[in-house]
Amino acid sequence: LTLEKIKNYYFSNCKPKSSHKIGLEYEQISLNCITKKTDLASILEIIKEFSQKENWKLIYDNNVLIGAKKDNTSISLEPGGQFEISLSPHSKITEISNELKNIQDTINKIAKKHNVEFLATGINPVQNFETIDILPKKRYLIMANYFGKKLPYAHMMMRETAGIQVNIDYESDL
C-alpha cells in the first residue's frame, strides 16, 4: 500500500455536489433495566418484534440472528450487544434525524416491554468486557481471537464501547 494508491482510491470516489449524501451509523450500549447487564437474548427478541412490526427482513450469520434490514437501512448487534442503527444515505440532515427518531421511538417502545434500555454513551458504565458475552457472529469470533493475541485493549473496545460514524460524500480534496 502506497500513498499514491490511497490518494487514487479517495479521488476515485469523488462525486458531484448534486449527488452528495450523508450516512449515519449510530451505536448505543444496551442494558437490561433490572440486572444492569447486556442481555443478548432480549435484544434479539426486540429485533424480531421490530422486524415483524415494521416488515423488515431478518439477517442471519450461520443461523445466528444478527439484525434486520429494509432497503438500505439496518439495525444490528455489535460484538458486545451494542445496538446499531445504520441509516441509508440521505441528502439532508433533517431526513437522517427524522428516520433515526422514527426507528428509535419504535425500538424503545418494544425494548421497554423487554426491560431493556439503550444508552447513548461511548462506554458501558456498569460492565467490563470480562462480563459481556460476545455475539457469536463468525466475524466477531475471529476478530476476538485474533485481536486478543495482538492488542491488549481489543476485547474492551469490542464489548464495552459504542460510537457514531458519519459518512459524507465529497467532491474533491479542497
Image (tube, rainbow, N blue to C red):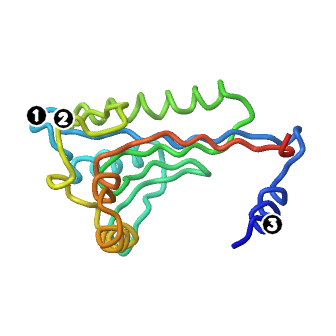
Q: Earlier in the sequence, mark 1 or mark 3?
A: 3
Coordinates of residue 48 in the picture (x, y in percent): 34, 51
Quadrant assignment, res 161: top left
Q: Residues within 10 Å of mark 2 (few under 14, many from 20)?
A: some
Q: Give the residue pinned by disc 2.
A: 115
Question: Marks 1 and 3, Cα distance to the nearest angstrom?
Answer: 54 Å
Q: Give the residue pinned by disc 3.
A: 4
Which residue in the rendered view is the most extreme toward the front? 3
Q: Is residue 43 left or right of residue 91?
A: left
Q: Going 34% across and 55% down the picture, which residue do you hit?
A: 158
Q: Earlier in the sequence, mark 2 or mark 1?
A: 1
Q: How many labels sit on residues? A: 3
Which residue in the rendered view is the most extreme toward the left? 35
The kind of secondary structure element at disc 1 is loop
Question: Marks 2 and 3, Cα distance to the nearest angstrom?
Answer: 52 Å
The kind of secondary structure element at disc 2 is loop
Coordinates of residue 61 in the picture (x, y in percent): 40, 70
Quadrant assignment, res 46: top left
* Amino acid type for the residue under numbered disc 1: Ile
Q: Nearer the viewer, mark 2 or mark 1?
A: 1
Q: Earlier in the sequence, mark 2 or mark 3?
A: 3
Near-viewer residue (141 or 152): 152
Quadrant assignment, res 117: top left
Q: Going 57% across and 43% down the picture, which residue do you hit?
A: 87
* Amino acid type for the residue under numbered disc 3: Glu
Q: Would you place residue 55 above or below residue 117 in this image?
A: below
- Which dot marks residue 125? none
* Amino acid type for the residue under numbered disc 2: Asn
Quarter of the image with the N terminus is bottom right
- Which dot marks residue 34? 1
Quarter of the image with the C terminus is top right
